[in-house]
Amino acid sequence: MQKESNFSTFTGPIRYNLTNDYMFRATLQANPQVLKGLLGALLHVAPEAIEEISIENPILLGESFKDKKYILDILVKVNQKSLINLEMQIVDKHDWNERSLLYLCRVYSNLESGDEYIQVLPATHIGFTDFTVTPDNPQFYSTYRLMDTKNHQLFSDKFTLCVVDLTQINLATVEDKAYQIDRWAKLFKSNTWEELRMITSNHPYLT
């Protein structure tokens, strides 16, 4: 029987950290507890409030590592009431705004034949980028919704786009830090096992 590796003894650089889109996808798919913790932070709710999650587009872990047909985002149904699309994007292809909107629209189109429009599930696209989408107005965690341009009245709370800028962790707000979103971002950016242990220390979901 192969001896299980001891996380506490690993040292040195991490070959593939969690900004690698496959590692990001594989880790969250394989660990529902971690996924609940991350979603709780991003949605500003206690992870315990997320009773049920299901990945709607699972991949074959390991077998799909080199398969180019896979789009490595994660579509999650939360408590049977909403759909969250998570994506890790490191390379700036200068099309993030258009692509993320397209992904969000696809997620929002979730009615079955015969359903009433009022039954559409809320859709959220959350992108983790290693570049700044809005260089004129950099933010760490930003949220965008449809609203009136004059009085800012919200048109719908069922259509939301969020960006976590992994290059702007230093701009995390008090609220971001309260939900430890900055700590999750540092986890994804960790490049050594020593750094990883320090960040995950005493945090059950991060560990």
Image: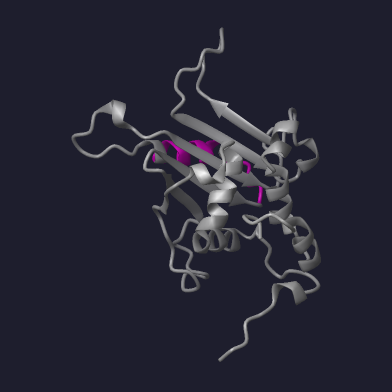
Q: Position of residue 72 (x, y in %)?
A: 51, 56
In this rendering, the count of numbered labels is 0
Q: Position of residue 45 (x, y in %)?
A: 56, 38
Q: Residue at x 50, y 52 (%)?
A: 73
User: Quarter of the image containing the N terminus?
Assistant: bottom right
Taking 17 as reference, is 122 above or below it?
above
Q: Position of residue 22 (x, y in %)?
A: 56, 62
Depth order, front residue of 80/47:
47
Q: Residue at x 51, y 17 (%)?
A: 147
Q: Residue at x 68, y 63 (%)?
A: 17
Q: Left of 70 or right of it: where is 196? A: right
Taking 25 as reference, is 176 above or below it?
above
Does the magenta segment cover residue 95?
yes
Q: Which residues are magenta?
A: 91-106
Q: Left of 136 or right of it: where is 147? A: left
What residue occupies the far bottom of the structure in this picture?
1
Q: Left of 172 or right of it: where is 30? A: left
Residue 95 visible in the snapshot: no
Taking 61 as reference, is 110 above or below it?
above
Q: Position of residue 94 (x, y in %)?
A: 63, 42
User: Quarter of the image containing the C terminus?
Assistant: bottom right
Q: Residue at x 79, y 74 (%)?
A: 11
Residue 98 visible in the snapshot: yes
